[in-house]
Image (spheres, rainbow, N blue to C red):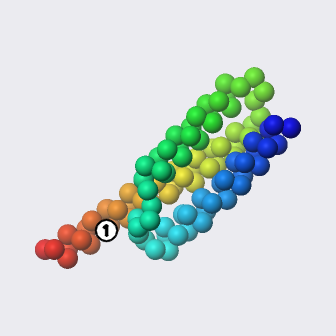
C-alpha cells in the first residue's frame, strides 16, 4: 500500500514539470525560475532513485516515475542555462 501512495506522490508532483518546461519554451526567459530550487529537486530525485535501487522491495514502475521526473527537471535546468545565456547575449548587445 505504501508503494501506491509513493507512486501517487511522484505522479502528482511530476505533473507540474511539463507545465514548467512549456512555460520556459513559451517565454524563453529565466524570469521567475530558481536554479537552486531546480537543482535541489533534481538531487532529491537522484536520492529517490538510489533508494529504490538499494531497496529490498525494488519496483521498476516506481523507479520509472522517479527517472521520468528527474529527466523533466533536468530538461528544465538545461533550458534555464540556455535562456540565461541568450538573455546575457541580448543584454550585452544592448549595452554595447
* As drawn, 80 above or below 89: above
* As drawn, 28 above or below 65: below
Outermost residue to the left: 96
Identify the residue under disc 1: 87
Return the x and y of residue 21 as percentages of the image width and height. Answer: 54, 63
Please identify the quadrant where the N terminus is shown.
top right
Return the x and y of residue 8 as percentages of the image width and height. Answer: 77, 49
Outermost residue to the right: 1
Q: Secondary structure at mark 1?
A: helix
Return the x and y of residue 37 as percentages of the image width and height. Answer: 48, 50
Q: Quadrant of residue 80?
A: bottom left
- The residue at 75%/37% (across/down) is 60
- The residue at 44%/56% (across/down) is 34
Q: Quadrant of residue 2?
A: top right
* As drawn, 69 above or below 51: below
Would you call the spot at circle 1 few (<14 residues within 10 Å), some (14-19), or many (20 or more)?
some
- The residue at 70%/43% (across/down) is 64
Side of 59 where 36 appears, left or right: left
- Total numbered badges shown on the rendered structure: 1
- The residue at 49%/51% (across/down) is 38
Looking at this view, is 39 or 22 the one in front? 39
Side of 65 where 36 appears, left or right: left
Please identify the quadrant where the C terminus is shown.
bottom left
Looking at this view, is 35 or 77 the one in front? 35
* As drawn, 3 above or below 72: above
Return the x and y of residue 33 as percentages of the image width and height. Answer: 45, 61
Amino acid at each position: 500500500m505504501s508503494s501506491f501512495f509513493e507512486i501517487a506522490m511522484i505522479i502528482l508532483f511530476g505533473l507540474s514539470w511539463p507545465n514548467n518546461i512549456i512555460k520556459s519554451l513559451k517565454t524563453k526567459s529565466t524570469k521567475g525560475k530558481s536554479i537552486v530550487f531546480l537543482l535541489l529537486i533534481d538531487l532529491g530525485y537522484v536520492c529517490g532513485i538510489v533508494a529504490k535501487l538499494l531497496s529490498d522491495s525494488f519496483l521498476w514502475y516506481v523507479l520509472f516515475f522517479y527517472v521520468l521526473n528527474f529527466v523533466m527537471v533536468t530538461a528544465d535546468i538545461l533550458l534555464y542555462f540556455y535562456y540565461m545565456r541568450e538573455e546575457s547575449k541580448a543584454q550585452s548587445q544592448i549595452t554595447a
